[in-house]
Image: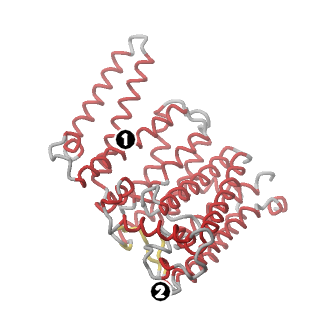
Amino acid sequence: MKKQIFSFDLTLFVLMVLMIAVGILAQYSSGYTKPELSDLYLKQFLWFGLGLVIVLFIFSMHLKAIHAYSVWFYFIIAFMLILTLVFGKTVRGTRGWLVFGPLNFQFSEIAKISTILVLARYLEYHFKELTQLRDFFIPFIIVLFPVLLILLQPDLGSTLAFFPVIIIMLFLAGADLKNIIYLIVIGTISIGVPLTLSYYEFKGILSENFWLKTLLSSSVLTYIIVLMLFAWSVLKIILIFYPAYTLLNKINAVIIILVISLAFSFTITHSLKPYQKKRLLVFIDPSIDPYGTGYNIVQSKISIGSGGFAGKGFLQGSQTQLGFLPEQTTDFIVSVVGEEFGWIGIITVLGLYLAFIVQGLKITFTARDSFSALVAGGITGMFAFAIFINIGMTLGIMPVTGVPVPFLSYGGSSLISSMVGAALLINIKSHRFV
């Protein structure tokens, strides 16, 4: 215990507290002239207090206990996601919150942590054994289970963070780089095809009988997938009698990629709501929705740009105080910092995040065992992805997906999840010499 306490990562803890302080300050500014937002910073402060208790609790746990109970934690969170689908509170078309008296909690946030823990436990026992594409099946199922439950809400933004995390963890587990590239290709085709179709559909330049649109909107897809799988099986039987294993592997890879990509394209086409498609399409062309999601990006860029070098001053941001900036306590809170504290404020926030990520990478590569390294790598990747997406979103270089920025954005679920992730990193660092 003495060794663990003396190896407490004070740097990571201080960085976390500083970022939370910046977020509470920005939330106070957002509610300064708006009564409906005036008490959000107090609620966030209370969530921060609860988070500190959780941080101390996780820090006091032995890594063996975290390892042992990770599977239970995973299934408990999955069960809470199922309860959310049945009894959850609906906000803007998403049934994503369970209500506990005065508190609303979004379990899709903490599901990222539970998935990282279980995936790390599985990969620990298969370290450097992921040489074939079929070896990815179990990790894929581990991630897909909570992802499907969250997509049913539907909450696209929360699901996006799962896929870069699994790629990072597979890479750290020694998976064949070629197979990781296959996964990236599958993801690109799966998302790219339906979004491209949606883009041309919104533009009105896509005919109703276009073959790809017909394919993804009818049962024809089922027959094509079945036919491909049948052809794959026949080829595998024929080629097994000839020395053509390289060719067989290439055919296997191509057919598997096409089947999975088409299946996901079909799912995405039918599961995304029109407003979710618009959010992603606005990234390609803001003129698609100039008074909706496009308006959000425009106002965010105006806020950051008008802040200049040193900003307009605390509580002096016109876009923030007059309510032109939308979702200023959650999705676009970095824009509040940019308007009131300018380039200096943005660089300070980016510097804090960069220092946090670098510290997370140090913990990953100095961890005492593979489970700890995989957990630390997954959590660091989760933070890096959320930071990149959210700040890119406020600058108009990434689509608006509703991904909160860690520690700054208002929301108990996001804050608690981020603090749990930080606590696990601190725990891994503290057990390095124990």
Q: Where's residue 141, x and y in %?
A: 45, 46
Does residue 93 lie above or below 260 as drawn?
Answer: below
| Secondary structure at numbered mark 1 | helix
The amino acid type of the residue labelled 2 equals Lys
- The single residue placed furthest to the top in the displayed view is 242
- Residue 189's disc is 1
Q: Residue drawn at (49%, 35%), measured in percent from left and top?
A: 181
Task: Rate crowding at label 1 as few (under 14), some (14 to 19) or many (20 or more) other CA atoms within 10 Å.
Answer: some
The local secondary structure at tag 2 comes to loop
| Residue highlighted by disc 2 | 34
Q: Quadrant of the N terminus?
A: bottom right
| Image spot of residue 163 (x, y percent) | 48, 48
In the image, residue 160 lies at what x, y percent? 45, 54
141 relative position to 126: left or right = left
* Quadrant of the rendered image containing residue 286: bottom left
Q: Quadrant of residue 285?
A: bottom left
- Pair 2/1: label in front: 2
Q: Which amino acid type is shown beneath numbered disc 1? A: Ile
Mark 2 Cα-neighbour bin, 10 Å: few <14, some 14–19, many ≥20: some
Q: Does residue 428 appear left or right of residue 193 in this picture?
A: right
Q: Is residue 214 left or right of residue 392?
A: left
Tell me the residue at 30%/21% (across/down).
234
Residue 55 visible in this rendered orientation of the protein: yes
Any part of residue 413 in sight:
no
Query: Where, by quadrant of the figure, is residue 122 drawn?
Result: top right
